[in-house]
């Protein structure tokens, strides 16, 4: 799909809900280093384009990482210049801050209802781990799903998988948003887990974790 790309490196793919387009990191250096842009192409390989460059978003030395499609076609991504989550509207050129109140936030993964899961380092009391947070698209409300645990990677999970159980060889799985439930696939110390994202706004983190576990036995409705 990247035969028309002028870049040497492509990574962190995200598939649109309709399965027609893919957005990904693109640049001449690997691992999302300075100068990494966001590119988009149809799944049949046509229509390659650079969706957003670091220069257009901030500066040429910036990097745009971990893109993820929203249900409305907008692209959420992690910025290198202020370590927060940003949003590029569908057909727009100007970016918008998606979570201005969350410093050291990144690796966004958009859920089918538009909420955004991400890895947050900046929670007060956090001892240095990447904790799992789910927030509204504008960042005005959020819920902590996993605290005091260092999560390395998140992805969307399919509806057919059972809730809250380890998965073998699934740590880097990328599934179509069309198959998303309210589940988030997380990678913790090389083990993969499914976490249900309940609608439990305002509930303390420990209560939310208990709520997630209760779902395994069919409890905690919502």
Image (cartoon, rainbow, N blue to C red):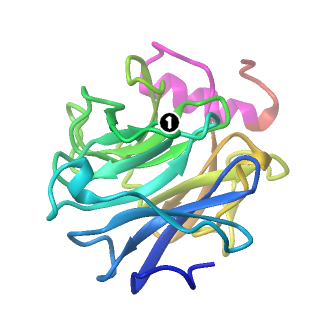
Q: Disc 1 marks which residue? A: 116
What residue is drawn where x is 56% and y is 68%?
Answer: 48
In the rendered image, the quadrant that contains the N terminus is bottom right
- Looking at the image, is 92 positioned above or below residue 167? above
Q: Position of residue 128 (x, y in %)?
A: 22, 51
Q: Magenta stretch containing residue 56, yes or no?
A: no
Q: Is residue 101 left or right of residue 66?
A: left
Q: Is residue 210 left or right of residue 21?
A: left
What residue is drawn where x is 75% and y is 56%?
Answer: 19
- Looking at the image, is 53 positioned above or below residue 84? below
Q: Is residue 109 left or right of residue 180?
A: left
What residue is drawn where x is 41% and y is 23%?
Answer: 138
Q: Magenta stretch containing residue 207, yes or no?
A: yes
Most extreme residue toward the top is 202
In the rendered image, the quadrant that contains the C terminus is top right
Most extreme residue toward the right is 160
Residue 101 placement: quadrant? top left
Q: Position of residue 167 (x, y in %)?
A: 69, 65
Region in magenta: 197-215
| Nearer to me, 215 or 109 | 109
Q: Is residue 218 left or right of residue 23?
A: right
Residue 204 placement: quadrant? top left
Q: Residues within 10 Å of mark 1 (few under 14, many from 20)?
A: many
Q: Position of residue 169 (x, y in %)?
A: 66, 75
| Nearer to me, 49 or 142 | 49
Q: Position of residue 162 (x, y in %)?
A: 79, 49
| Nearer to me, 87 or 213 | 87
């Amino acid at each position: 799909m990247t035969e028309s790309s002028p870049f040497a490196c492509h990574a962190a793919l995200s598939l649109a809900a309709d399965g027609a387009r893919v957005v990904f990191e693109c640049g001449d250096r690997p691992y999302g280093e300075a100068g990494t842009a966001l590119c988009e192409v149809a799944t049949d390989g046509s229509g390659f384009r650079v969706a957003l460059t670091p220069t257009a978003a901030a500066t040429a030395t910036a990097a745009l990482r971990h893109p993820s499609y929203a249900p409305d076609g907008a692209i959420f991504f992690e910025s290198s210049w202020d370590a927060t989550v940003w949003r590029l509207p569908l057909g727009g050129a100007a970016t918008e801050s998606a979570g201005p109140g969350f410093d050291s936030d990144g690796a966004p993964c958009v859920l089918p209802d538009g909420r955004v899961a991400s890895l947050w380092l900046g929670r007060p009391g956090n001892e240095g781990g990447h904790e799992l947070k789910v927030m509204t698209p504008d960042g005005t409300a959020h819920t902590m799903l996993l605290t005091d645990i260092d999560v390395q990677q998140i992805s969307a999970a399919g509806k057919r998988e059972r809730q809250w159980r380890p998965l073998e060889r699934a740590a880097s799985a990328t599934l179509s948003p069309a198959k998303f439930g309210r589940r988030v696939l997380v990678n913790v110390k090389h083990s993969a887990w499914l976490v249900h994202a309940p609608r439990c706004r305002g509930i303390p983190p420990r209560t939310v974790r208990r709520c997630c576990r209760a779902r395994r036995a069919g409890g905690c409705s919502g």
